[in-house]
Amino acid sequence: MIVPPKISVIMSVFNDSRYLKAAIDSILMQSFKDFEFIIINDGSTDNSKELIKSYQDNRIVLLDEKNKGLAASLNKGIMISKSHYIARMDADDIAHQDRLKLQHKFLEENHEYIVVGSQADVITYDDQFVYSSKLETEDSRIKAYMQAGIKNGRPVTPFFHSSVMIRKPILLKFGLYCEHMKKSQDVVLFNRLMNYGKYSNLNISLIKYRIKPRSVSIHNKKAFIEMGIILSEAINNNCLSDSSQQKLEVIIKSNSRNKEFETYIFIGKKYILNAKNRSSAVKYLFKAVKKRPFSIVPYFLFGFTLLPIFLRSLIAKRN
């Protein structure tokens, strides 16, 4: 009888060749060895497929698919997986070598928990450390945070998506990823599952999470409100109406034009809050100025970098 692996690591890849090797290596070098690594090539047009195929490791299962989007790719991986536990991994993040071991141990010893994530060391697209996260770790506080988000019309996720390990039977029984969602699929999933078991984040950084210009942030107030309505609809129904799908596409398209600018501003803010990283803050704020020289935002933030270190430390504590 063939014994299934204890964990299925699932990763979707779309034109991620720049970071892909580091992501794959970090999984293959895990201290916990009993896993399968399902990699879905979601219609990449770069050399991602060739890079994946260059590995000679029988734990890798490569699915070469037409581009269907992240949610559909992850659902495909989940459906063919052989394990009781699903570990998510993104193609541009890096896993700590003990990640699978620690999360598997936690779920084996705590049967009431259905999802476990971790803290993360956040890095830039060019591998510079920015900050270490301080996510809530206890089930009650995690869910209070999520419920407050729903109440305020802004559903949120308490996890770094590529840090989580989930019990597969829960996914199969109560729903997979909403394939209509082209953004925030994890927000919808974790808000839908929170009534079916406990959540936790291990209070240790088990991944390096990369901030990328490809990520789209919603800053327009009207679009922000509409996005909250769309997320709530998807959480309640696990699907979207045609009109909501169209609105979502418009929101993503309209906010994608400034994604590099917003990324540089986000990194700059985080470095300002880390009081000892003035030079790094300035570096990324200058990048923001080059993208939008007439925006007042980077110049306003430049002012914060000139504050004495004790004032920046005070701001950091308040944030």
Image (cartoon, helix red, strand yellow):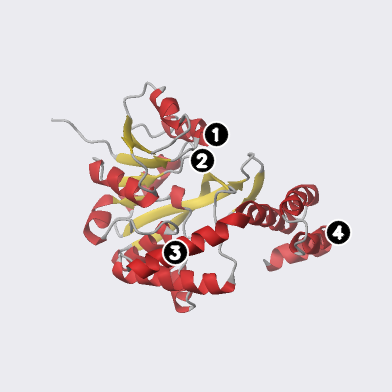
Return the mark for residue 248.
3
Q: Earlier in the sequence, mark 2 or mark 3?
A: 2
Q: Are marks 2 and 1 in contact (CB under 8 Å)?
A: yes
Residue 60's place in the image compared with 315, above or below, is: above
Q: Secondary structure at mark 1?
A: helix
Q: Residues within 10 Å of mark 1 (few under 14, many from 20)?
A: few
Report x, y in % for residue 149: 48, 72
Q: Secondary structure at mark 4?
A: loop
Nearest to viewer (mark 4 / mark 1): 1
Location of residue 38 by image quarter: top left
Q: Earlier in the sequence, mark 4 or mark 1?
A: 1
Name, please, the residue furthest toward the bottom: 151
Left or right? Give the position of 306 relative to 95.
Answer: right
Q: Earlier in the sequence, mark 3 or mark 4?
A: 3
The Cα–Cα distance between marks 1 and 3, rounded to whole angstroms, is 28 Å
Q: Residues within 10 Å of mark 4 (few under 14, many from 20)?
A: few
The Cα–Cα distance between marks 2 and 3, rounded to whole angstroms, is 24 Å
